[in-house]
Image: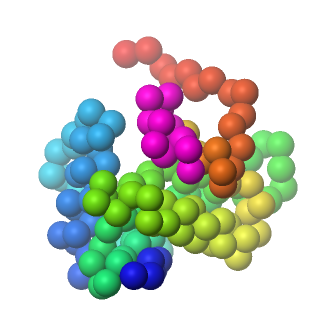
Amino acid sequence: MAVIVRPLVREDRAAWGALWHAYLAFYETARPDEIYDTYFERLLGDDPRDFHCLIAEIGGTPVGLTHYLFHRHGWREEDVCYLQDLYADPSVRGTGVGRALIEAVYAAADAHGAPSVYWLTQDFNETARQLYDRIGRVTPFIKYERAS
């Protein structure tokens, strides 16, 4: 069956929540219910500073998601696009869902005039990295964050 990628709609709340929960569990984290509610409303809002969401469907069933954001960059005049979350249900991995979601973000970035799209993943995410190595390029940057 074909993969259809489309924007998030209010009726996706339960499916989106299940997919995002599974994504967070993969990265060994969880968020309180209030965060799910707040994030979902922001994804549906019209604030250009907020994230956008695309849903991948197969046979009318949501099977994947991506969240992405446009932001300014100090070294460029145009915005860049940060692809924060990408998730495909394990039952559909290898069917083109991840590629379709990334390519849809690429298309959204092109439409927004943001030629640069970037994302992070953990080094142990070998399955996803096989796709990322085909559709993107790895950079030499190492991520640091504020110590707790």
Say if 104 sits above or below 79 in the image.
below
Query: At 78% from the left edge and 42% from the top edge, which residue is drawn?
Result: 74
Residue 123 belongs to the span the image colors magenta: yes
Left or right placement of residue 8 versus residue 52 in this view: left
Query: At 30% from the left edge and 84% from the top edge, which residue is drawn?
Result: 60
Where, quadrant-wise, is the C terminus in this rendering? Answer: top left
Query: At 23% from the left edge and 51% from the top edge, which residue is drawn?
Result: 21
Say if 3 sits above or below 40 in the image.
below
Query: At 28% from the left edge and 60% from the top edge, which residue is drawn?
Result: 91
- Residue 13, position in %: x, y? 22, 71
Does residue 10 appear in this view?
no
Asked whether 35 or 118 is in front, the reply is 118
Write down the quadrant of residue 26 in the picture.
Answer: top left
Count of numbered labels shown in the rendering: 0
Where, quadrant-wise, is the N terminus in this rendering? Answer: bottom left
Asked whether 28 or 78 is in front, the reply is 28
- Residue 66, position in %: x, y? 45, 61
- Residue 20, position in %: x, y? 29, 55
- Residue 65, position in %: x, y? 39, 63
Say if 139 sits above or below 148 in the image.
below
Write down the quadrant of residue 43 in the picture.
Answer: bottom left
Structure colour scheme: rainbow
Left or right placement of residue 35 versus residue 86 in this view: left
Q: Which residues are magenta?
A: 121-131
Asked whether 46 or 22 is in front, the reply is 22
Left or right placement of residue 75 versus residue 122 in this view: right
Q: Residue furthest bottom?
A: 60
Asked whether 133 or 18 is in front, the reply is 133
Residue 78 belongs to the span the image colors magenta: no
Q: Residue furthest top?
A: 147
Does residue 27 appear in this view?
yes
